[in-house]
Amino acid sequence: MNAKKATLIGLVAILLWSLIVALIKDVSSHFGAVGGAALIYTLASIFLLVSVGWTQLRTFPKTYLIWGSILFVAYEVCLSLSIGYSDNNRQAIEVGMVNYLWPTFTMVAAIVFNQQKANLLIIPGFILSILGICWVLGGDQGFDLASMLNNIQANPLSYGLAFIGTLLWAAYCTLTARIAKGVNGITLFFILVAIVLWLKYLLMGGGAFHFDMQSSISLIFAAAAMGFGYAAWNIGILHGNVTLLAGASYFIPVLSAFFSAIILSTSLAMSFWYGAFLVCIGSILCWISTKAKAK
């Protein structure tokens, strides 16, 4: 596969990931937060088995098999349930934006734990990302601490899961870079996520699902965006222009908010967009700080 085609496939992954917040929220409205997430990851696992395939367990470094599984599963559970448990569509989009702090935290973790070289741009990048989230969570008031705290207190579970997920994904990315040794465990990890979610669903009492055309289409699209997104990204970073893909990925917060607002028919105030752009700019500065020579 040539580099241009692989890069294009990688860009498709970014587009698919930008749809995930809205699609998870839509599926949860039909099947519930836990049941909907279990269905999504089950179907996504099937898509990954077909597109990426299965990696033999014996090829996994033991440390990566254990810690990669724990961190990946914990992150995906936090991500899906934080969105599923949101009280309304606006809140789901805000929760999704909290999740997109992960690029900033990943860069910081890489500097602290992997001795990644960086210059002083990491400081304003980190500050801008945090300010952007505060702006988003302030609602229509913009950067307002009282409004932000009231917003979080309205649903601490969703916002808390999203923030914990951000830290978990940063830890996963940082650790994977050190211990994966080129092994791709995505299919196994997705299956494990599905198993954990089904166990939680059964422990909650389970219950039958009621499928109709709308809910089935929503489920298929959500699973396809999740599963094929990872598959496409894997092709992009292996064979495409990694620098271009990495740079483009930092615009996912804005793209996600844009598509979510359309799919979920939700109006977002200008203050939200200010915050979303600040998150993007902050993440990009953090990324640039690791590419330039540290002073």
Image (cartoon, rainbow, N blue to C red):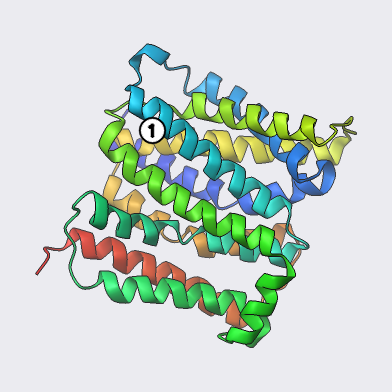
Query: Residue 35 is drawn in which quadrant?
Result: top right
Front-most of residues 282 and 177 = 177
Q: Which residue is mark 1?
A: 235
Q: Quadrant of the C terminus?
A: bottom left
* Residue 91 versus residue 190 in the image, above or below: below
Amino acid type at mark 1? Ile
| Residue at image coords 37%, 44% | 173
Give residue 155's position: percent from left, percent from top. Answer: 72, 65
Q: Is residue 22 left or right of residue 67?
A: right
Using the image, determine if residue 75 lies above or below residue 254. above
Pick out the residue farthest to the front.
203
Which residue lies at the image location 68% right of the left edge and 34% below the top edge? 197
SS state under label 1: helix
Nearer to us in this view, 48 or 208: 208
- Residue 266 location (% of width, % of height): 74, 67
Residue at 58% x, 39% y is: 226
The answer to whether residue 119 is seen in the rendering is yes
- The reply to whether residue 4 is visible in this rendering is no
